[in-house]
């Protein structure tokens, strides 16, 4: 069974960096695909990858991670200013992060119009 777990930013906002990465890694180790509102800092992403690498074994093969954030806007100057202001106010809540166990998630593809989460076919194992 496939489980998607949505984690609102408010749920991790008060946690330390170490607790944030632990919460996300624990979910992935339980074969859940995490949809996190917002983003981790670059340092938290690096820590999550490092902790993942330390825990790889026969059962846990690692994670796939992708950050989806608003890209460069093509539009009027006032729209760009509005986007920058929102970014300053909202901080790491802008966009979202997808994290899933490597045994389930084959690849995460993104482009400006869609996100594709490609899964591994268990029948081919």
Image (spheres, rainbow, N blue to C red):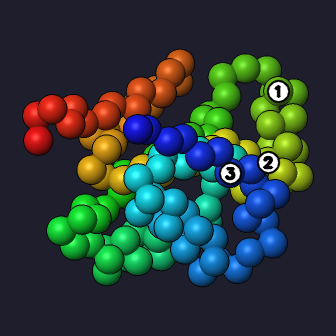
Q: Position of residue 57 (x, y in %)?
A: 22, 73
Could you give the CA–CA distance between mark 2 and mark 1, rounded to whole angstroms? 12 Å
Q: Earlier in the sequence, mark 2 or mark 1?
A: 1
Task: State how far apart marks 3 and 2 are (Cα).
Answer: 20 Å
Q: Residue at x 82, y 27 (%)?
A: 79
> Which residue is at the front of the view, 47 or 19?
19
The residue depicted at 18 percent of the width and 68 percent of the height is 58
Mark 1 to mark 3 CA distance (whole Å): 29 Å
The disc, 3 or 2, on the residue closer to the chain's N-terminal end is 3
Q: Is residue 113 above or below residue 81?
A: above
Residue 7 is marked as 3
Query: Left of 10 or right of it: where is 3?
Result: left
Q: Residue at x 74, y 50 (%)?
A: 8
Q: Secondary structure at mark 1?
A: helix
Note whether 31 is above or below 96 in the view shown: below
Secondary element at tag 3: strand
Q: Which residue is mark 2?
A: 87
Q: Residue farthest to the left?
A: 124
């Amino acid at each position: 069974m496939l489980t998607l777990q949505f984690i609102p930013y408010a749920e991790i906002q008060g946690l330390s960096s170490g607790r944030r990465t632990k919460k996300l890694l624990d979910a992935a180790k339980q074969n859940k695909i995490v949809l996190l509102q917002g983003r981790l800092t670059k340092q938290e992403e690096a820590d999550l990858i490092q902790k993942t690498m330390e825990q790889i074994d026969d059962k846990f093969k690692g994670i796939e991670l992708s950050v989806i954030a608003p890209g460069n806007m093509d539009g009027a100057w006032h729209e760009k200013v509005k986007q920058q202001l929102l970014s300053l106010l909202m901080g790491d809540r802008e966009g979202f992060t997808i994290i899933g166990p490597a045994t389930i998630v084959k690849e995460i593809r993104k482009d400006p119009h869609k996100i594709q989460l490609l899964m591994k076919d268990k029948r081919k194992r």
